[in-house]
Amino acid sequence: MTRVQQLLMVLCCLAFSINTSKAQTDMDAIMMSKKQLCIGPMYAHSSWKNYWEGTLKRDNANLGTVSTQLYSLMAAYGVSDKLNVLFSVPYIKTKASAGTLHGMQGTQDLSLFVKWMPVEKEIGPGTFSIYTIGGLSIPLTNYVADYLPLSIGLRSKTASARLMLDYQVGNIFATVSGTYVFRDNIKIDRTSYYTDHLILSDEVEMPDASNVNFRAGYRSDKLILEAVLNKWTTIGGFDMTRNNMPFPSNRMNATTAGIDFKYTVTKKHNLFIVGGGNATISGRNVGQATTFHGGLFYVLDFSKKRSSKPSTKTTPAKK
Amino acid sequence: MKKLILLSTIITAAGIAIISSCSKDVVGRTDETPALKPANLDLNAGTWKPILLTAPTDIAVAAPIATNTPDYIAQVNEIKSFQATLTDKEKAIVKYWSAGAVLRWNEILRELVARHNLPPYQNADGTYPFPSANNPLAYPQFPFANPPYAARAYAYVSAAQYDALVSAYYYKTLYNRQAPYNADSTVNVLIPRSDLPSYPSEDAVVEGVSVELLKLLFPGDQDYIQLKAEEHKRARIIAGANVRSDMEAGEALGKAVAQKFVARARGDRAGAAAGNQALWTALDSTTRARGEIPWISQESPKRPPMLPAFGKVKTFLFDSLTAVSLVPAPPPLTASQQMKDETAEIYNIVKSPTREQTRIVHFWADGVATYTPPGHWDAIAAEDFIGKNFSEVRWARNMALLNMSLMDAAIVCWATKYKYFNPRPSQLDPGIKTTTGLPNFPSYISGHSTFSGAAAAILGRIIPERATAYDAMAQEASLSRMYGGIHYKSDCTVGLTVGKNVGAYAIQRANTDGADN
């Protein structure tokens, strides 16, 4: 049997790399003000030709370039100035440029985050703030996880806990966050599979994962421009063996570096565009993906009072 | 602020602790299988018809020492001293092996197949390396346990286990030495008691025969195989099921019987199944000479077709002339309207597959890094056999019937594939994208269909009340290859029929092997 060889996981990577890059996300130190809803579509394109089979970097003429397109609806809402909820729903489409394998498409996972800023304080010349973010993700459809690298996701229900620290002096800022991602076991369509041993079950033990994100740059009401470094690490899992297919419980690690921006289009600060891109600089059992994304967001103000500044809070509270 | 940080930290830590405490361990379907307690001891199994042996006495087994000799008493004391200091790990080993020797060695074999079912990566010049049995640990590791290789491995191991057990049961009734717990009532017994004579040990027979054959079939995995063998032997003594002399006699018998099968395997022509450049070229040119479009590898770089001479391997259930007679009539001509229609049918199925179709494709795919379709049928059979409380010898007999069917199905199927060398749907229409890996060998007839037709036929004979269910599974397995975009309808329907015809020979054997008297 042939095998078309494969590779893996852009998806899980993709999911996080895209999340990291949208504005007002679970990964940035930006809060919506009370009763404001920021909502809009996002598009992302990710592709790779090379991938890491375990730690061995290779290409695969039976896959060519594997590309993933993501269309999503994202929103953030200010329950209060210090408490936001966020969600996103992506539709994903995959394709391999070579070989015979059929791509896949479908609605992937609903992500929900609650973001709380318990601390915002003047320290030294700038403003220091602390955020805690709790997240959940749940597959919205019965999509296929066990068809990497062309499945649209890993199907695991996840819960994540994140601590994020931000410091801003004038218009210069830096944000660092660490996340632990709990991943629930998944069910696949076959009744046995081989990891580093044979398992006679359709249930797959999914290793947990961690994520570290660092971003720094310029931040004003009009423009945010930042460099982003992200490191996703699977805690456990196994390596793909030589010329084998990828599997959802592989040890997928990826470090990406990129740039993001958010530009406010209107003077009322209620319409803005976001965009960015990143490249995978190291990885294990993942594709060496290059990702671009862009989105358009609109802010709706549900507060009675007409705020003179209905947009996100992007400057230190006190000057 | 410090309080808030502290609070957040506590909440986070508590959350992590709660979630981490949930076990994610996956329990395999046969992990909790209860100890084997045969409904029928099959004490007459020494009279059943063996496969390669001419008689159960082909290998001599010396009479055992009496249970009142000092030597025997010392062996019983060995059991008692093990049992005096039982660890949890030892109890777990006893529990694992008590589910049945044939079951567990079949699972070990399936594991080895899955580990080795990986096609070699190409050389820098675009050719492909072949695994070498003489250098099994060098890349590409030996073997590439693809479906024909696996079918043959399952058949040899099962058939040899059966012959060895027929011989063992002959000696069991001949010598009638009772189990240690019957000889000495103070022996603690960790498995169900049985009146089956314990010399030679049926477990040791299965262990010995399996180890010897796996040396041939998986020469690079000796460390793992020996580990399992030692564990198996220890489990029987710890459990109080056998004394050491039961085990030694059984293992020696198993190894001796295995040698007969090893000798057969060395001469069954499987070693030449990969063919060579001259054969690969001839397959292409003779097909063109017939005016047909030949199969072409769709891998990049192009890979030589899988085991083109496997169709010449020596069958178990019938002779080579019968094997030739089981090869079906040709597929529709590649230029015919029927072939165009069948290709269009696949295109339409695969254009936008339903979730249920994809489930079926993946359920039956049994592709890379799996135990292959024959292993899947072994898994289906094993899980049904568990519920039937078969004796070890009946387990072996039924597995041998199944696996000889699967191997012979592979041989007839491969003979057909390389007789007609028919292209895959995605070769005739490159617009067809497959929802599972495209096998690197000709299309007609479908291997899955042939395997499944044969397996369903013999399993329906062994467990008649499941016959309808097995047929439905075979139909679904067959259909999965159309849903996957890799086979035409003709490949599947003819494959099922050919498989069923092969299975008929196993049924015929089952009717006359003496096991149902």
Image (cartoon, rainbow, N blue to C red):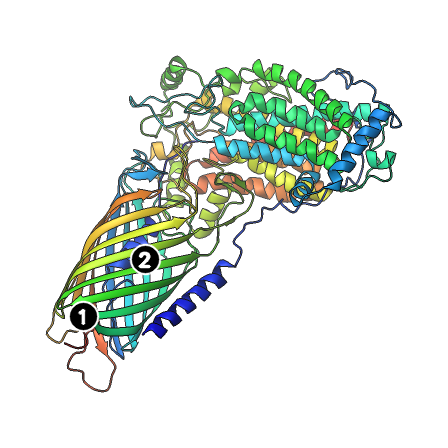
The correct choice, above or below, for A271 with respect to A235 in the image is below
Q: Nearer the viewer, mark 2 or mark 1?
A: 1
Which amino acid type is marked by label 2?
Tyr
Q: Residues within 10 Å of mark 2 (few under 14, many from 20)?
A: some
Instruction: List the residue tagged with mark 2.
Output: A91
Q: Position of residue B323 (x, y in %)?
A: 58, 20
Q: Secondary structure at mark 1?
A: loop
Q: Tell whether A23 sits left or right of B462.
A: left
Front-most of residues B354 and B494:
B354
Q: Residues within 10 Å of mark 1 (few under 14, many from 20)?
A: few
Which dot marks residue A124? 1
Say which quadrant the N terminus of chain A sits in. top left
Which amino acid type is marked by label 1?
Gly
Q: Tell whether B98 sits left or right of A212.
A: right
The correct choice, above or below, for A96 with respect to B231 in the image is below
Q: Position of residue A174 (x, y in %)?
A: 20, 62
Q: Tell whether A28 sits left or right of A315.
A: right
Q: Secondary structure at mark 2?
A: strand
- The residue most toward the bottom is A305
Does residue A287 appear in this view? no
Front-most of residues B442 and A180:
A180
Q: Position of residue B76 (x, y in %)?
A: 81, 32
Q: Position of residue A209 (x, y in %)?
A: 39, 53
Q: Mark 1 falls within which chain?
A: A
Q: CA distance from mark 2 to mark 1?
A: 45 Å
Does residue B225 appear in this view? yes
Residue at 37% in and 23% down: B294
Residue at 80% in and 33% down: B77
Q: Mark 2 falls within which chain?
A: A
Residue B298 picture quarter: top left
Residue at 54% in and 28% down: B150
Residue B97 picture quarter: top right
